[in-house]
Image (spheres, rainbow, N blue to C red):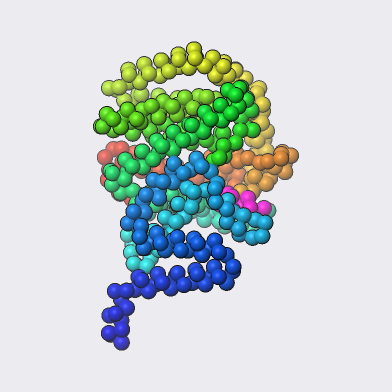
Amino acid sequence: MENILSTIRPNLEKILLFAVFVFLLAAAIAFNRPSFFIITALLFGVFFFFKKQLWLALVLALPALPLGNVLSIELRPFWNYELSIAEALLLLALAVFLLDRFLSIRTAEIRFDAVAFFLLLYFALAAGSIWQAVDFKYYLFGLKAIFFSFAGYLLALNLIDSKRKIRTMLYSAAVALLILSIQIFYKFYQLGFSEKLFFERKLIILPLGPLATIVSIIAFLLPVVLAFFLHEDDLKNKAVIFPIFCFGAFALFVSLGKAAILAFVVSMSYLLFKIKKTRGFFLLVLVLAAMAGALLFTPLAAGLLTRIRTTFVDVNTRFRLLEYQTAAALIKDHLLFGVGSGQQLYYFKKMMNLDTSELVNNFFLQALIDFGLLGLLCAAMVLFSLWQKTVRIVRGADPKQTLL
């Protein structure tokens, strides 16, 4: 018996891995799902050959995000689950990461901090709301956004653990910004550079989703890319990164998203306040860019002024007010537990008599509608923990230090 055990222990990981593979293969055959067999083969191929380079899945996920949903998996007859390349990369990386840690009995090495904890708690609230699901497709739609947020953060926390990897991720963010900006300009070109891009924003859909979603992501990426430019030492790399930042900033203003532009201005004001050595240079660049935009793209400047003047009376604003009124009615009736994951889409479509439904354009309001006061508290704790960790890192604390 001791001889048998001594033979098994060194090969325990391979034995367990083979058992998992056989189980998944048998399930794919039993349920007649060839796509599951392909996914299983891909999972184990990555595990055997690329698990040490798993962090590259995160690097590739960012530029893949603008491509939108390109994969389709049949869950039931006449019901296909649409999956993006970015989501597929995150799923594959998470499966390989957890498989590696569990099979090698190294679960204690999984880093887990306060942000990950509250994201997991938020996901648990979403998953537990299945009893409220009126429409199961909407339930999965709401669930996957929270799941991929948790998966992406957990993987980054454990796999992005060196300066080289961080720099590579920042280059990836710059590429993602460039692709999203190109998509906006190409859509502008398709519309014949007309004012439809400004005043019919709700009808404009890009591969990743509605124009408002794309612009929000750009507004988030711009300060990150600018900070990367300021910390980069190589002048050749600076010469590439800064034009991407300028191109992204121009794409943001072309879209004329008031909230996104306001967020961008606030973040830039903060950076300019903090950056003393190059403050004058950046102010000059911003002023010249604004003047060039106003002179060379007069319709754009006129459209921006029109949107600002009509902030409280235009179609988009009236629609937002109607959204908030509908949200208030839902919150009143479902204050404690909310309406459940993704069900806001169902209720808004029904209550507002819409052909299609949209998510609420407010993170905290979305949490309150979906999961009530508990969801709002959990979402607030996610952001608070993230802010707290960022402050500790900036002040010189160990970046690897956990908060729990």
Q: Nearer the viewer, residue 311 or 151?
A: 151
Q: Quadrant of residue 187?
A: top right
Q: Is 136 one of the magenta-colored residues? A: yes
Q: Residue at x 32, y 19 (%)?
A: 281
What segment carries the magenta color? 135-143
| Number of marks present in the image shown | 0
- Image x and y of residue 303, in percent: 58, 19
Q: Nearer the viewer, residue 79 or 350?
A: 79
Q: Is residue 301 left or right of residue 11?
A: right
Q: Is residue 68 left or right of residue 20?
A: right
Q: Is 119 one of the magenta-colored residues? A: no
Q: Is residue 203 left or right of residue 189?
A: right
Magenta stretch secondary structure, dominant: helix
- Asked whether residue 189 is in view, the answer is yes
Q: Nearer the viewer, residue 28 or 192?
A: 192
Q: Residue at x 39, y 40 (%)?
A: 172
372 is higher (above) or lower (below) than 202: below
Furthest residue in direction right, as rendered? 353
Q: Is residue 399 left or right of residue 210?
A: left
Q: Residue at x 45, y 29 (%)?
A: 248
- Image x and y of residue 336, in percent: 60, 49
Which quarter of the rendering shows the N terminus? bottom left
- Asked whether residue 257 is in view, the answer is no
292 is higher (above) or lower (below) than 152: above
- Image x and y of residue 59, in percent: 39, 45
Furthest residue in direction bottom, as rendered? 1
- Image x and y of residue 56, in percent: 37, 49
Q: Residue at x 58, y 51 (%)?
A: 82
